[in-house]
Amino acid sequence: MNFSSKLIEDSVNAFATLPGIGKKTALRLTLHLLNMPTESTESLCEPVLKMRNSIQFCATCHNISDEAVCSICSDRARDRSVICVVESIRDIMAIENTNQYRGLFHILGGVISPIEGVGPAELNINSLIKRVKKEEVKEIIMAISPTIDGETTIFYLSKQLAEFPVNVTTLARGISFGGELEYADELTLGRSIASRRPYGQ
Amino acid sequence: MNFSSKLIEDSVNAFATLPGIGKKTALRLTLHLLNMPTESTESLCEPVLKMRNSIQFCATCHNISDEAVCSICSDRARDRSVICVVESIRDIMAIENTNQYRGLFHILGGVISPIEGVGPAELNINSLIKRVKKEEVKEIIMAISPTIDGETTIFYLSKQLAEFPVNVTTLARGISFGGELEYADELTLGRSIASRRPYGQ
């Protein structure tokens, strides 16, 4: 594409580095900013730069935080005997949005994946073990995606945690609420028949 | 959505002001920047801010430009006797990408639209008339979208230009190259039969 302006070209290339944004969308965003007052570009960039430069990670659970300890870890109303182990920040947001969980979290930062060269050393596993040793934890919930890598990670963690007096649990598996039975995959449907439950419980 | 961080929330809201970017995409972009080194956020924002603060508009044709006169107007190799009148910068890019046009441009900045309150005074029409008076212009090509507002604008401009010795032309209308005949709209197909041309011309 010929932009007739180096400034426009640089701006388009900058936007196009973002995931899911190609050259055409990047151009649309650039021309949008050109049509708006100068201040609106500053009010776009300023919070983004500030976020990246000032963000901290919670020393306890590795969640994003504005302070040294995140708002979840410092909330005394939460149940400190349960830790929910998740892959990423996004999973915490998803679980928090359900309003069904009042315990603490621990972000692993990924899952064990030999193909992608991610071993246990690359994940926040040592800090989890330390928390289990130091704090009075009764239950560890493995809220990790049920993929092959996820299952490997759950297996590895459960072995590591076996020596401590904690219950290791995983999320319930089964068909989705509101899901059509005929579209459920065979494995999920098969397992959910095998683990059927008395009605009403 | 609960972001557990004011910084994240501000960044998400900033991204979400852009067209076509909702809260979910804005969060994805924010978390993407968090996963990348700090410098990558700076190399996103710096060119965008520079673009918005340093961009100029060509004094002659109102095209975006890094200098007072744009690269098209200052290109002495271009045919200065033809001016192509377009609505916006994007149209110049589209026409330039065809590599079929070697004349100059003039950006109107929109079309006459009584519904949206855009009259001739809001458009760059006076500067076009001045160019026609001052420069040796032989032809004005109306490369304006064939909508109702576009046609109104072409009609208005052609009246304004009637007193000058210039040819006013419009883009050829007809069925698209590579288009399926059965999907062409009735108006276009009807007109293209009426204005049929000898084969090979």
Image: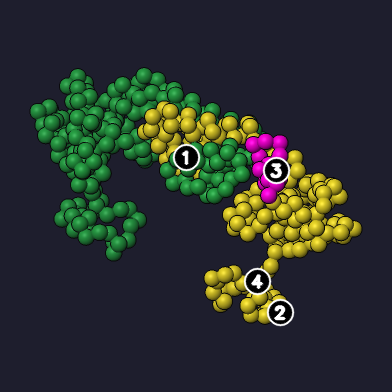
Chain colours: A yellow, B green
Residue B2 location (% of width, % of height): 57, 48
Residue count near mark 1 (Cα–Cα under 10 Å), binned few <14, some 14–19, many ≥20: many
Single out the mark in the foreground, 3 or 1: 3
Marks 3 & 2 on one chain: yes
Residue drawn at (83%, 59%), measured in percent from left and top?
A166
Residue A74 is tagged as: 3
Please, what secondary structure does the residue beneath circle 1 have? Answer: helix
N-terminal-most mark, 1 or 4: 1
- Chain identifier of the residue bearing label 4 in the image: A
Please, what secondary structure does the residue beneath circle 2 have? Answer: helix
Q: Residue furthest front?
A: A77
Magenta residues: mostly which secondary structure? Answer: loop
Residue A174 is tagged as: 4
A18 drawn magenta: no
Residue B114 location (% of width, % of height): 18, 41
What's the CA distance linking mark 3 and mark 2? 41 Å
- Chain identifier of the residue bearing label 2 in the image: A
Residue A26 is tagged as: 1
N-terminal-most mark, 1 or 2: 1
Please, what secondary structure does the residue beneath circle 3 have? Answer: loop
